[in-house]
Amino acid sequence: MAPRTCSVANALEVVGERWSLLALREVFFGNTRFDQIAANTGASRDVLAARLKKLVAAGVLEKRQYSDHPPRHEYHLTDAGRALHNVLLMLKEWGDTHVTQGPLPLVWEHSCGRTLEPRVVCAHCGEEATSESLTSASVAS
């Protein structure tokens, strides 16, 4: 039996590895240079270089040269990379709720002045998308 065709599995092929997600976190925080990303993630240089190369090849990040001598590059989010922002917010929320013990290492404040509590809602009706409110409209075999 063939495994289920699934966009989650397809997405995980691109971003579903620890160092890839942590590198994206750093770029979202504005740390775009290799040394910054390496320092803030703790990834080894060779592993990080491979993950960044994969993210660039997948169109999630764009590599831009900022120095000629020696050649140095920065990494910037593409539209596909920026689209992962809410994924990272929800992953952080899950980690805050189910994994992190003690004080939270980071709290986001929304422009409304309140602590951000991210939710997934339907773009049409504004209702929260829960497992109870969703049904499968089509299933690929």
Image (cartoon, grey):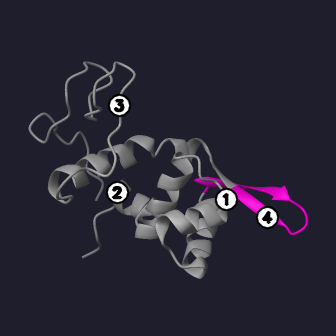
Task: Describe the element under mark 2 as helix, strand or loop.
Answer: helix
Q: Residues within 10 Å of mark 3 (few under 14, many from 20)?
A: few
Between 81 and 70, the residue placed more toward the observer is 70
Kindly report which numbered mark, 4 or 2, lies closer to the viewer in this rendering.
Answer: 4
Q: Are marks 1 and 4 in contact (CB under 8 Å)?
A: yes
Real-space Cα separation, disc 3 to disc 1, in angstroms: 26 Å
Q: CA distance from mark 3 to mark 4?
A: 34 Å
Q: Position of residue 114 (x, y in %)?
A: 28, 24
In magenta, the rendered stretch is 59-74
Where in the figure is residue 6, as x and y percent of width and height? 33, 58
Neighbourhood count class around disc 4 (C-alpha, 10 Å): few under 14, some 14–19, many 20 upward? few
Helix, strand or loop for disc 3:
loop
1 or 2: tag closer to the N-terminus: 2
Q: CA distance from mark 1 to mark 2?
A: 29 Å
Question: Mark 4 belongs to which amino acid?
Answer: Arg
- Please tell me whether mark 1 sits on a helix, a strand or a loop: loop
Return the residue nearer the eye: 85 or 98: 98
Q: Amino acid at mark 1?
A: Arg
Q: Which residue is mark 1?
A: 33
Which residue sits furthest right? 69
Residue at (44% x, 43% y) in the render: 85
How far is the residue under mark 4 from the one under mark 2? 34 Å
Tag of residue 72: 4
**Residue contact at pointers 3 and 2, CB within 8 angstroms:** no
Main secondary structure of the magenta stretch: strand
Amino acid at dot 2: Val
- Residue furthest toward the front? 103
Q: What residue sits 28% from the left and 59% below the top?
A: 141
Residue that label 2 marks? 8
Question: Distance from label 1 to label 4 (Cα)?
Answer: 8 Å
